[in-house]
Amino acid sequence: MSPLPNSEGLLRRRFAHSAVESRRRLGSSDPAPRHPAVVSSERTVAQVSLYPHVIRKAIPYPKPPLATERFLLRPFRVNDFEIANEVGEDPSTARWVNALPSSDGAGVVRFNESKRRGGSMLDLVIADRISDAYLGEILLFSREWQAGELAYVVAPFARGRGIATDALKLLTRWAFDQLGLQRLQLKADPDNAASQRVAEKAGYQREGLLRSSFVVRGRRSDSVLYSRLPTDASP
Ligand SMILES: CC(C)(COP(=O)(O)OP(=O)(O)OC[C@H]1O[C@@H](n2cnc3c(N)ncnc32)[C@H](O)[C@@H]1OP(=O)(O)O)[C@@H](O)C(=O)NCCC(=O)NCCS
């Protein structure tokens, strides 16, 4: 059974772990609305260090867009919905990730923009450099102070050409250099060999197994945790 009630379908995020986190961020567990005094202009140093996440800012889009010879990373557009949904519902994808957060393109754009402005998520389409066609998506989540988590999907027809690895390398470097993040991590199902291989090729180190830490379409599973620090050698 899905952990999210149907009425909250709009808040579903494509990626398992992030769906739950994104929902929590909007819910009563978010400390920001419950500690209004902390966001006042009289914030003390101690309060800032205790509640650093309340000074969260919008995550900017990379400018100029991050790109390789084959693709560039750009915002999700309304007309990406059909192919994104088809890719997401393909059994080879749906086994590992959740559905899109809305049943239409405008809803996805609204959801992504609200998360980006709130500083909790940046969703970028991996688009063909020449045709601008949707090849996949890569997401950066921000849930902890100076740390981020990444997730990715590549369309079945574009797999096996290093696209996920290149996108992950690009966004990782940008997050360290431009956002100043000090730790990036990603989680993969222990059976998802392709995702783990992508993590390793992009220089992420395996840290261990997180028990029952992943929720994909209502099914809980373990996940393998990978991380990369700005000081790690580039792959
Ligand atoms: C995981 C995914 C993003 C990889 O995208 P991609 O563009 O094909 O990735 P790359 O080409 O950069 O690298 C894939 C690597 O995995 C390897 N791989 C693919 N399938 C594999 C399998 N079943 N077993 C072992 N390795 C596998 C490839 O051989 C390649 O490694 P290599 O370069 O050493 O040969 C894509 O398969 C996908 O979208 N899967 C569904 C969604 C998903 O699992 N997302 C991750 C959620 S944590």
Image (cartoon, grey):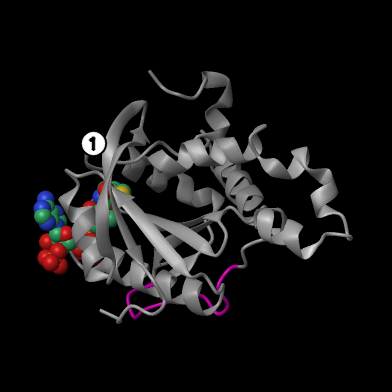
Q: Position of residue 118 (x, y in %)?
A: 67, 52
Residue range highlighted in magenta = 61-71
Location of the C terminus by quadrant is: bottom left
Task: Give the residue at mark 1.
Answer: 91
Give the residue displayed 30% in from the left and 81% down from the top.
234
**Majority secondary structure of magenta residues:** loop
> Viewed as shown, does residue 223 lie left or right of 65?
left
Judged from the image, the quadrant occupied by ligand 1 is bottom left
Q: Position of residue 199 (x, y in %)?
A: 26, 62
Badge 1 marks a residue whose secondary structure is: helix
The answer to which image quadrant residue 229 occupies is bottom left
Q: Position of residue 77 (x, y in %)?
A: 54, 54
Location of the N terminus by quadrant is: top left
Give the residue displayed 68% in from the left and 61% down from the top.
49
Report if residue 67 lies within the magenta region: yes
Q: How many marks?
A: 1
The answer to which image quadrant residue 117 occupies is bottom right
Give the residue displayed 39% in from the left and 39% down from the top.
16
Q: Residue furthest front?
A: 46
The answer to which image quadrant residue 167 occupies is bottom left
Report if residue 152 lies within the magenta region: no
For label 1, the crowd category at 10 Å Cα-Cα, with few meaning under 14, some 14 to 19 and many 20 or more, is few
> Viewed as shown, does residue 151 lie left or right of 222?
right
- Amino acid carrying mark 1 in the image: Pro
201 and 6: which is toward the camera:
201
Can residue 13 be seen at all in this image of the molecule? no
Give the residue displayed 21% in from the left and 56% down from the top.
196
